[in-house]
Image (cartoon, rainbow, N blue to C red):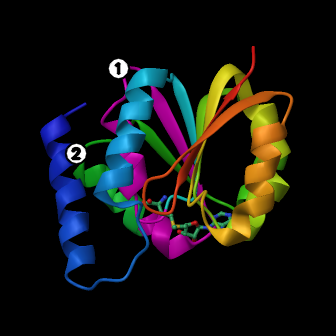
Amino acid sequence: MDSERIASVLSEIERRVNKGYFFPIIGPVKGELLYAFTLLARPRLVLELGTGIGYSGLQIARALEPGSRIVTVDEDQENARVALANFRKAGLEDVITVVVDEAGSFLERDTYEYDMIFMDIEKSRYLDLLESCILRLRPGGVLITDNALRPELRRFREAIMKHPKLSSAIIHIEDGVSLSVKKP
Ligand SMILES: C[S@@+](CC[C@H](N)C(=O)[O-])C[C@H]1O[C@@H](n2cnc3c(N)ncnc32)[C@H](O)[C@@H]1O
């Protein structure tokens, strides 16, 4: 993992977004949090739902240990194309696999067991996909979701806080990030 190369692509995306190129990325503050969580979790296999143009995937990738991998899913072909170009620029084409698919359809077919799942898709899908995410996580694995404090995610917050298989916390940074560990 060439961390300088990854950092340079991250800065380039931040510069473009700051100059008015509109694309919703988690940004540097929540990006650093995602990086720190990944360092703590030391995942071998990560699933990301909502690739965007690759910013959050790069934040996760820079914390990975050699041999670890990310599968990232986005339903938008054009976003996936830009993300793949960014991953190539960062030298991560062998570390990150981009899948063009709707997250729910992907989870229905998928059979892998993940150490970490990061979800950042259309907010109305969070609650629908919660059980599938838990199913695909190994015991002790972690589900991280972006935007957890948004008003429309109230029922999702309640679901992760009271779920018998999860231990959850919500971090009050910007519009929130939730962290749920699947109980062993
Ligand atoms: C907020 S952006 C992701 C940003 C990215 N995680 C980052 O911080 O760099 C949301 C992405 O999710 C994708 N998306 C939204 N709903 C989806 C769904 N149901 N299945 C797959 N992708 C979805 C969109 O095409 C978009 O690229």
Left or right: 28 as drawn, with respect to 179: left
Which residue is located at x 67 percent, y 70 percent? 151
Quarter of the rendering occupied by the C terminus: top right
**Label 1 neighbour load within 10 Å: few <14, some 14-19, many 20+:** few
Label 2 beta carbon less than 8 Å to ligand 1: no
Q: Quadrant of residue 76?
A: bottom right
Rendering coords of residue 31 (x, y %)? 36, 50
Q: Amino acid at mark 1?
A: Pro
Which residue is located at x 32 percent, y 41 percent? 92
Residue indicated by mark 2 = 6
Q: Earlier in the sequence, mark 1 or mark 2?
A: 2
Residue 22 in the image: above or below residue 52: below
- Residue 143: which numbered mark, if any? none
Decide if residue 77 is in sight here: yes
Residue 42 in the image: above or below residue 122: above
Q: Which residues lie in the magenta part?
A: 52-81
Residue indicated by mark 1 = 66
